[in-house]
Image (spheres, rainbow, N blue to C red):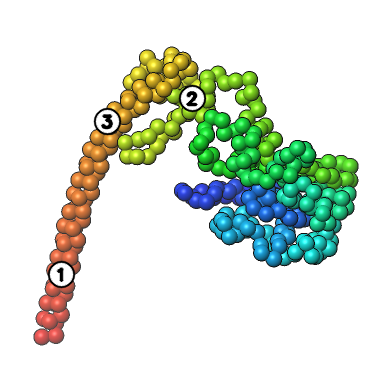
């Protein structure tokens, strides 16, 4: 089997980079009914749509709250989907009929709410893959808790190294929630192809977040190994108030870094104690090297500017010469013309 891939679209500072492939649409002909609101469900259904699914959103009369709180997010994640307005409290029959035709149903209510509204897993045919994206799963001790991404990360212990700093991306919503939902749905569709039956899959954003850090439960090689504890894996501030990422975990890369900085003696300290002192030495030598590089770059820029000015002067002379030649030719033609008709 051959997959024909389209061109890769690349843009600096673009909203996203996509690899479009019209030949890879495994969910073509699959109907996804999205009952969710906010980020996790929107991201999950967008990923299913990218795989070729037809996504129909069921929105209440007031729409998805994300449209008001983050309209650009809503526009980006909901592009290419369809939507219908349905008040589940007063007209659940319409949504239930739509879910009855679906291959996949996504919902993000707190456990028990979808059932009470008449659009729960027991209200759809057995062929439907029904996915519930929850905060804490179905455990009665926590199922009814409300929360958002930051709460789930806190409960899961993900923030231990970096608190009170906030993560730069919504890990619980997008990775533990949305992407795990996509994986669960795809697994459910494979199971349905094998058995003819769908099923109810439950995604817990708290448990999924914990899974992302569970491999660290027995401890790191050094404390906060990949969250600021290592000098060779850190973000350094530059003199122009920007930042430089260094991720030289492998010895060969750290050796190269130290060689560039003129400090090969630092190689053996890569995983030694007192990483802050090592980071300070790396930063100091990096400042000297970057300062030298900047002076060299400045000289090169000045040279190029001088060359450009010389070329510009030559072009001006060439234009003046060409103009003079053109005027001379014109004058000779005019002189010949006057002599011809004067005679």
88 displayed left or right of 155: right
Q: Residue at x 35, y 19 (%)?
A: 263
Instruction: Please give the residue where the numbered disc 1 appears in the rendered image.
Output: 327
- Residue in the foreground of this view, choosing between 340 and 316: 316
Alpha-carbon span between mark 1 and mark 3: 53 Å
User: How crowded is the residue under tag 1: few (<14 C-alpha within 10 Å), some, or many (20+)?
Assistant: few
Q: Secondary structure at mark 2?
A: helix
The quarter of the picture where residue 55 lies is bottom right
Instruction: Please give the residue where the numbered disc 3 appears in the rendered image.
Output: 292
- Circle nearer the viewer, 3 or 2: 2
Circles 2 and 1: CB atoms closer than 8 Å: no
User: How crowded is the residue under tag 2: few (<14 C-alpha within 10 Å), some, or many (20+)?
Assistant: some
Q: Secondary structure at mark 3?
A: helix
Question: Of the residues under marks 3 and 2, which one precedes in the sequence?
Answer: 2
- Relative image position of residue 309 (x, y in whole percent): 20, 50
- Relative image position of residue 22 (x, y in whole percent): 67, 52
- Relative image position of residue 48 (x, y in whole percent): 70, 50
- Residue in the foreground of this view, choosing between 343 and 114: 114
Q: Residue at x 16, y 61 (%)?
A: 321
Q: Residue at x 11, y 77 (%)?
A: 335
- Circle nearer the viewer, 2 or 1: 2
Instruction: Please give the residue where the numbered disc 2 appears in the rendered image.
Output: 229
- Circle nearer the viewer, 1 or 3: 3
Q: Quadrant of the C terminus?
A: bottom left
Compared with 115, 228 (above or below) is: above
- Residue in the foreground of this view, choosing between 19 and 320: 19
- Relative image position of residue 43 (x, y in whole percent): 65, 49
Question: Of the residues under marks 2 and 1, which one precedes in the sequence?
Answer: 2
Question: Of the residues under marks 1 and 3, which one precedes in the sequence?
Answer: 3
Circles 1 and 3: CB atoms closer than 8 Å: no
Say if residue 328 shows up in the picture.
Answer: yes
């Amino acid at each position: 089997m051959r997959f024909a891939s389209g061109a890769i679209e690349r843009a600096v500072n673009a909203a996203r980079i996509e690899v479009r492939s019209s030949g890879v649409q495994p969910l073509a002909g699959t109907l996804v009914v999205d009952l969710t609101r906010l980020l996790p469900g929107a991201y999950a259904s967008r990923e299913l749509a990218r795989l070729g699914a037809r996504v129909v959103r069921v929105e209440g009369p007031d729409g998805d709250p994300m449209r008001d709180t983050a309209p650009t997010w809503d526009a980006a994640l909901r592009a290419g989907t369809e939507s219908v307005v349905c008040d589940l409290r007063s007209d659940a029959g319409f949504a239930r009929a739509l879910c009855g035709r679906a291959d996949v149903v996504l919902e993000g209510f707190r456990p028990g709410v979808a059932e009470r509204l008449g659009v729960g897993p027991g209200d759809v045919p057995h062929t439907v893959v029904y996915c519930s994206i929850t905060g804490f799963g179905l455990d009665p001790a926590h199922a009814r808790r409300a929360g958002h991404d930051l709460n789930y990360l806190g409960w899961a212990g993900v923030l231990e190294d970096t608190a009170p700093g906030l993560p730069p991306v919504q890990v619980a919503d997008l990775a533990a929630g949305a992407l795990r939902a996509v994986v669960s749905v795809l697994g459910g569709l494979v199971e349905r192809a094998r058995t003819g039956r769908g099923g109810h899959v439950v995604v817990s954003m708290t448990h999924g977040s914990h899974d992302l850090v569970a491999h660290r439960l027995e401890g790191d090689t050094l404390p906060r190994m990949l969250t600021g504890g290592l000098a060779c894996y850190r973000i350094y501030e530059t003199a122009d108030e920007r930042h430089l990422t260094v991720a030289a975990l492998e010895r060969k890369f750290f050796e190269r870094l130290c060689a560039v900085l003129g400090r090969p003696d630092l190689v053996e300290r890569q995983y030694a104690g007192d990483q802050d002192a090592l980071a300070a030495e790396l930063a100091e030598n990096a400042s000297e090297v970057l300062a030298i590089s900047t002076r060299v770059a400045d000289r090169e820029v000045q040279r190029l500017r001088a060359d450009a000015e010389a070329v510009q002067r030559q072009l001006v002379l060439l234009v003046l010469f060409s103009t003079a030649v053109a005027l001379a030719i014109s004058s000779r033609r005019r002189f010949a013309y006057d002599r011809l008709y004067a005679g």
